[in-house]
Amino acid sequence: MTTRFVTLTGRRASQTLADPMAEPKDNPLMEKIVSLCKRRGFIYQSSEIYGGINGFWDYGPLGAELKRNVKELWWRDMVQLRDDVVGLEATIIMHPEIWKASGHVDTFSDPMVDCKTCKGRFRADQTSEIPCPQKPSKMVSECHGEKTAPRAFNLMFRTYVGPVQDESAVAYLRPETAQAIFAQFKNVLETSRQRVPFGIAQIGKAFRNEVTPRNYTFRSREFEQMELEFFIKPDEVIEAIKGRVTPGAERDTRHSTLDTSSWGWEAWHKYWVEERIAFYESIGLPRTTLEEYWQKPEELAHYAKVCVDILFKFPFGTQELEGVAARSDFDLSQHERFSGKPMGVFDEELRAAWGKLDERKKAELSKRYYEARLKYLTKMSVEQTQAEKEAKEDADGLAKGQYIPHVIEPSAGVDRLMLALICHAYHEDQMPDEKGKMETRVVLKFHPRVAPIKVAVLPLLKNKPDLVRKAIEIRDALRPHMNVFYDDAGAIGRRYRRQDEAGTPFCVTIDFDTLGEKPELKDTVTVRYRDDGRQERMAISELLNWLLVKIR
Amino acid sequence: MTTRFVTLTGRRASQTLADPMAEPKDNPLMEKIVSLCKRRGFIYQSSEIYGGINGFWDYGPLGAELKRNVKELWWRDMVQLRDDVVGLEATIIMHPEIWKASGHVDTFSDPMVDCKTCKGRFRADQTSEIPCPQKPSKMVSECHGEKTAPRAFNLMFRTYVGPVQDESAVAYLRPETAQAIFAQFKNVLETSRQRVPFGIAQIGKAFRNEVTPRNYTFRSREFEQMELEFFIKPDEVIEAIKGRVTPGAERDTRHSTLDTSSWGWEAWHKYWVEERIAFYESIGLPRTTLEEYWQKPEELAHYAKVCVDILFKFPFGTQELEGVAARSDFDLSQHERFSGKPMGVFDEELRAAWGKLDERKKAELSKRYYEARLKYLTKMSVEQTQAEKEAKEDADGLAKGQYIPHVIEPSAGVDRLMLALICHAYHEDQMPDEKGKMETRVVLKFHPRVAPIKVAVLPLLKNKPDLVRKAIEIRDALRPHMNVFYDDAGAIGRRYRRQDEAGTPFCVTIDFDTLGEKPELKDTVTVRYRDDGRQERMAISELLNWLLVKIR
């Protein structure tokens, strides 16, 4: 069945997917997950004491640590471990013209109908699914209320900047982080030591005034994105410099010494799809839980060459975690048009190479670049003569080493990734309780990399000062290196169970043997594994290094 | 001279401070700092290609890393290295009732006058400083335009949530992160393993529609806060349990094994002031650059017992980095009143201790608690008979182990701390260039903990594959442990200078001796110190551990 949805990349498409259920309560597994998330302090409803606010969720102590880990791992992988990507942190409120250039002011909207009788407002494509507020036995489409024709309802949150609240002061909360990267492209290029190909990465909040937030935190009105815009040379430039463009299928993958100099957009796009899937695998989402969905030509935005959605099999359906799009030079071109500031780069290598091309090759590359630019300008409704003139100037620029970079955009959602990690980690199994009786255990089997707490340090008994002292010593030795939880309250079995529900991979127990009751066990502790409850004895002196390897 | 200003804690006060200058261009040192921040990619104007947007700033590649470090260090210090503080990450848009409870809807405003002639809107206390837009030779207060009486202009950004944009859908961008902590207090208490005293910490964006953003990034409309709400027992509870309250001046400080069980609000407040100053020292702001400002009684909000501003000596004046306030039980009480949900806690220790008190002591503590509650209720305009009834119930609750926790709030601004770090790090000195001629050098002497890049790895020459290969080997060995910058372009002296301006504490140079040209120097590198340009030779095998100690 066909449902419309907002992609993470801020563009809309129709796509054949299982219809996402409206609420977790329709799904017993999701109900359990939602309950655990509240009970253990991963996720709370925002403003819960005031009845909540639809589409907004808060992260409690464990959720906040999980989120920090997810963002930190993305940043390390995408920025700090690479020479060719730098970071940016831009504001949520930007100049409103940015959203005209990006197309969001004109097209980022849902068609809505108003009911003049009940004053309700409904998504035009959902009137046959939503009960009439006044007569719930009928759907909105069947009820007697007089409806308006569908009208566009923009999904950006509006506000006013400055003391006067009129139209000139309207600004928007960004619906995606990507546009700030395009708007600051030239500043970053000029102040970092980067040249194309290179990327700019950003993590930050974005806001969409969704008409129907749903699926727990999956579709929220306030959410966080992790976006990379990776700028590359147009294929015509690669061909001028290298004589050929490596076909997407032929490229070598995932080596630190890749020769990417002849990669065109197709090779770079496939590279990033694979990088991103490898990232998900590295934090505990096996490939079998993921699907690649290559958008069909009719689903693509007009400027996109290709877009791959990386989907995760949620309990409520297979849904998008991330989109990896080849967006051509659309975004930079739009900002050039709207700001009047040049967004092109100068490439000395291209200029030098161009001089050595034969006339036939020059003509061929110029023609292709001309046609691509003309296509863009025509789409943007530039008058024909003017468009031809500008496209010719752009094509002439090639010979001088000038072009507007193209971009590959891997765009991921932090909140939906967290939800995927929690759903995938959720397990119930049978384990003996203190008295050996089997009981059902709930456990979050997080990859240690993302687990909010890496290790719990537990003195066997609270009222034995020597045990407590030793446990605190161990806590303080581990703590500078990882997130440690210290707990001395309650039976040890119950403390293990709490850590199972928190997803803590390891528990360390300090007992009387640690203190030397059995001399051969002095200065050893019990390490308990979360996943199978197995325990082993380990020297305190080995503990830190052992843990560091496990959580790396 | 007296200037009104918004404190970071969201409350307003009059305070005697140097009048902050309007713009960096009035200050030659600030002008240089602003220029460096742009040139090296620390800070850009938001939406610069569209002419910018007043009061909004973006962080470029180096700024984004600096900001990450500052936030990470705060979080480690305040949350992860402590047993008694947990994190929270709440939404920016919350239920609007929260801002009624907090007082922001009613009182978080500036008085403004409108000019009916030019349609301008001006802060009422600045009309004699602002030129008339139509006749700039005169100030607004002197011009002929007909002015309205001053009217309150609320500083919160407004927006609408959901498809219908009417008054029922109004919501605000949070003007501070603190209120989310109060609203989620009970959820956190019930789902983390914490008991009073404990704290909840949060880092996140906040928004204030300042009429006059000024001093570069110091007073922005969009900014980030790091706030801790540390919940403590009321002094009456401490006295019931421990028999006495440790006076503020008497307490032991900064030991990991502090006995804090008899600390009242005064001791906790002083503790947090000292902790926070120690934090600033630990990231490179010496005590001599800071000032403590104890707000005068007439400057305090009515519910605050005391508030200390920690000030930094900026080039444009001595200004607030952080406020540490003792806020009594005002915030939780307000949310209890507005939400109808109980915010009190039950304390078994208190219940047990109360039973053992003599009647005189019980009466005395009850009376003091009653009076404090009555004072709060009266301030909140509760009708007298009702207020007395409620205060009596509250006082009776003490005997059953019930009370509303008080709170100490250290509230810091990320952006102004970054600006302080940059201003303090900025130095100009004389250093010889490649040819030995002295030249002026600009250097940012960041503490290695906060430096965006920890080490730069530089092969002496780019066109010698063996040098490059060795340098890449070293880069890849260091990179998993710290932020490394690899640079092979240009003369080595110029590369050092770029790192000086980036604030990189160490440069590592790979030269022919590294490759064994002098056999006794094989597998050694040159380590260059940023601050004095000093260089020393070090074995590659020692490099990682040496750096890890330096940047810790």
Image: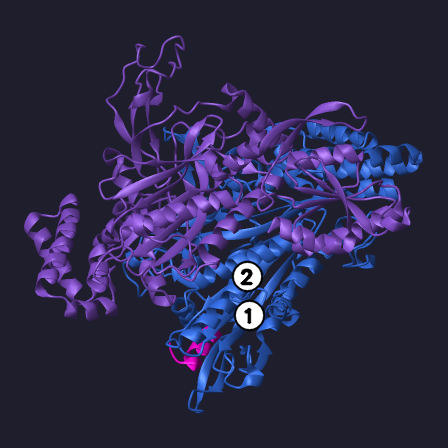
Chain colours: A blue, B purple
**Few, some or many C-alpha atoms within 10 Å of disc 1 (few <14, some 14-19, many ≥20)?**
many
Closer to us: mark 1 or mark 2? 1
Mark 2: few, some, or many residues within 10 Å (few <14, many ≥20)?
A: many
Taking depth in this image into account, of B521 and A487 the one nearest to the observer is B521
Q: Quadrant of residue B31?
A: top right
Q: Amino acid at mark 1?
A: Phe
Instruction: Give coordinates of residue A395: x percent, y percent.
Output: 79, 32
Q: Which residue is drawn at the image coordinates 40% and 46% (left, top)?
A: B274
Which chain's residue wears label 2? A
| Residue A8: in magenta span | no
Front-lying residue, B72 or A128: B72
Whether residues under marks 1 and 2 lie with C-beta atoms below 8 angstroms apart, the answer is no
Q: Which residue is tagged 2?
A: A417
Residue at the extreme left: B385
Q: Secondary structure at mark 2?
A: helix
Residue B457 position in % (x across, y down): 75, 45
Residue A446 circle label:
1
Q: Is residue B166 above or below residue A44?
A: above
The answer for which chain carries disc 1 is A
Q: CA distance from mark 1 to mark 2?
A: 13 Å
- Residue under the image location 68 percent in, 63 percent down: A278
* Three-letter amino acid code of the residue under disc 2: Leu
Looking at the picture, does residue A337 appear above or below residue B524?
above
Residue at image position (91%, 46%) is: B517
Let me know if marks 1 and 2 both belong to one chain.
yes
* The N terminus of chain A sits in image quarter: bottom right
The magenta segment is A490-500
In the foreground, A124 or B447: B447
Residue A113 in the image: state x and y as whole percent: 40, 49
Image quadrant where one finds the C terminus of chain A: bottom right
